[in-house]
Image (cartoon, helix red, strand yellow):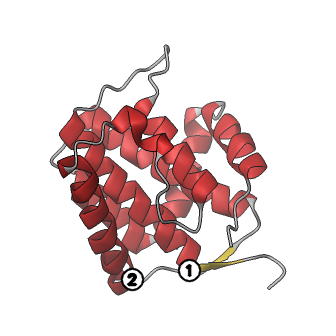
Amino acid sequence: MALVSQDVVEATWKKAAAMNARTARAVQKDFTRFQPALTGLTIGWTQELRADAVGLALYVTVVVFEMFRAAGAKTRKATEKSVMEHWKRSAELATQLESSGVEPSTLSGFSLATEEPHVLQYVIDALTEEPDDDPVHLTEKEFWHVFATLKTVVDTLHDVSTAASS
């Protein structure tokens, strides 16, 4: 069952888009402190990409973390083992989709295995939409790599979170 509703996704990405630099850094610090294994994955697995692609991956990671917090989910720290298990599955999925000729712009039309469909849809939208104010153009190879990284973040956060009432 999804912990993060479509309404929470919508409200959170809008709030994140309006954050000033100081608030954004504070949120990023919180994520780093509360989820060091996921921070390590995001930085480690994207460090070979272009700077703007890395920046986009980090930004979306922090927004996803905020979505879980905004939903009231109680989140434990993810273990490196859990993160790597999710990474393996996500990387395999990305490789399979890429080798099948799936275009990133059509990914929204696929039913992808995740417990957080609204959050994953945000990830796909963030990677494929090009805002007028600060467009980041990912190559296809960068897209699939960042997609696998962010799907790992989404699935891991779901697994280490419980609903607020639990």
Which of 129 and 107 lies nearest the eye of the viewer?
Answer: 107
**Whether label 2 touches label 1, CB < 8 Å:** yes
- Foreground residue, 40 or 166? 166
- Please say if 165 is above or below 119: below
Q: Earlier in the sequence, mark 2 or mark 1?
A: 2
Residue 160 circle label: 1
Q: Amino acid at mark 1?
A: Val
Residue 24 at x, y percent in the picture: 56, 43
Element under disc 2:
helix
- The three-letter amino acid code for the residue at tag 2 is Ser
The residue beneath circle 2 is: 82
Q: Is residue 86 left or right of residue 15?
A: left
Q: Is residue 89 above or below residue 79?
A: above
Decide if residue 87 is on the left or right side of residue 106. left
Quadrant of the rendering where the N terminus is positioned:
bottom right
Crowding at dot 2, Cα within 10 Å, few <14 / some 14-19 / many 20+, comes out as: some
> What is the x, y in percent for residue 131?
49, 20
Q: Name the residue rendered at 44%, 20% in the picture.
A: 134
Quarter of the image for the C terminus: give it: bottom right
Counting from the top left corner in percent of width and height, residue 45 is at 23, 58
- Residue reaching furthest to the top: 132
Residue 132 is labelled as: none
Q: CA distance from mark 2 to mark 1?
A: 9 Å
Of 128 and 30, nearer the camera is 128
> What residue is drawn where x is 67% and y is 67%?
2
